[in-house]
């Protein structure tokens, strides 16, 4: 091939993309039991950590645009997982809060990370290697999201 740099096997982005999709696929049976999608799970994790955040803060934490997260939040509100309301201090700001149903999911969801780690540890991948990979990816994300 004339342009070696264009071979899929030589790309950094493809293994990261493929691993992300495959890991998300591993999550799905666990999330199906909670009747949520992976993006909804991410939003819930942000709110379980700190409830009552503005839409912009959630989008920033998840490295998403607000126009991407807004339809997701609308669906979550229809499912009864969250509520959205305008801030009394600044009507341009929409605050997102967990409902009782959204809060109750936290206990069930708390078992998901352990189940995923168990699944991955059944392979030949060592836990220490996963931790190093996570640290490297966090560094890359931090660098690229500036």
Image: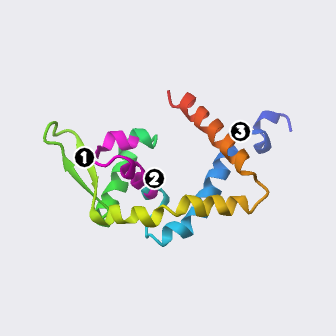
C-alpha span from label 1 to label 2: 17 Å
Q: Which residue is mark 3?
A: 12
Is tag 1's residue or tag 2's residue first in the polypeptide sequence?
Answer: 2
Earlier in the chain: of badge 1 and badge 3, it is 3
The residue where tag 2 is placed is: 42
Magenta-drawn stretch contains 122: no
In the image: residue 128, left or right of residue 143: right
- Quadrant assignment, res 60: top left
Residue located beneath label 1 in the image:
95
Where is 146 relative to 33, above or below? above
Distance from Cα at disc 1 to Cα at disc 3: 37 Å
Q: CA distance from mark 2 to mark 3?
A: 24 Å
Q: Which mark is residue 55?
A: none
Residue 47, horizontal then vertical, whole percent: 36, 50
Location of residue 10 in the rendering, given as x and y in whole percent from the top left corner: 78, 39
Q: Does dot 1 land on a helix, a strand or a loop?
A: strand
**Residue at the spot x=39%, y=65% of the render?**
105
Describe the element under mark 3 as helix, strand or loop.
loop
> Which of the pair 94/10 is nearer the observer?
94
- Front-most of residues 108 and 32: 108
Q: Is residue 93 left or right of residue 10?
A: left
Q: Is residue 67 above or below residue 35?
A: above
Where does the magenta region start and end?
41-59
- Does the residue at mark 2 contact the one at mark 3 (Cβ under 8 Å)? no
Instruction: Find the residue positioned furthest to the right.
Output: 1
State whether residue 130 is above or below residue 144. below
Instruction: Give the tally of numbered discs.
Output: 3
Mark 1: few/some/many CA within 10 Å (<14, 14-19, 20+): many
> In front here: 96 or 6?
96
Would you say the residues marked 1 and 3 are in contact, meaning their CB atoms lie under 8 Å apart?
no
């Amino acid at each position: 091939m004339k342009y070696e740099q264009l071979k899929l096997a030589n790309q950094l982005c493809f293994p990261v993309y493929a691993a992300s999709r495959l890991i998300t696929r591993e999550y799905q049976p666990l999330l199906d039991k909670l009747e949520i999608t992976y993006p909804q799970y991410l939003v819930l994790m942000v709110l379980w950590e700190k409830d009552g955040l503005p839409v912009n803060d959630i989008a920033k934490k998840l490295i998403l645009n607000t126009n991407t997260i807004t339809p997701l939040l609308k669906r979550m509100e229809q499912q009864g997982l969250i509520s959205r309301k305008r801030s009394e201090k600044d009507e341009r700001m929409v605050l997102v809060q967990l409902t009782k149903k959204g809060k109750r999911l936290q206990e069930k969801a708390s078992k998901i990370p352990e189940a995923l780690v168990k699944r991955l540890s059944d392979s030949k991948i060592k836990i220490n290697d996963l931790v190093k990979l996570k640290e490297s990816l966090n560094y890359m994300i931090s660098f690229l999201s500036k």
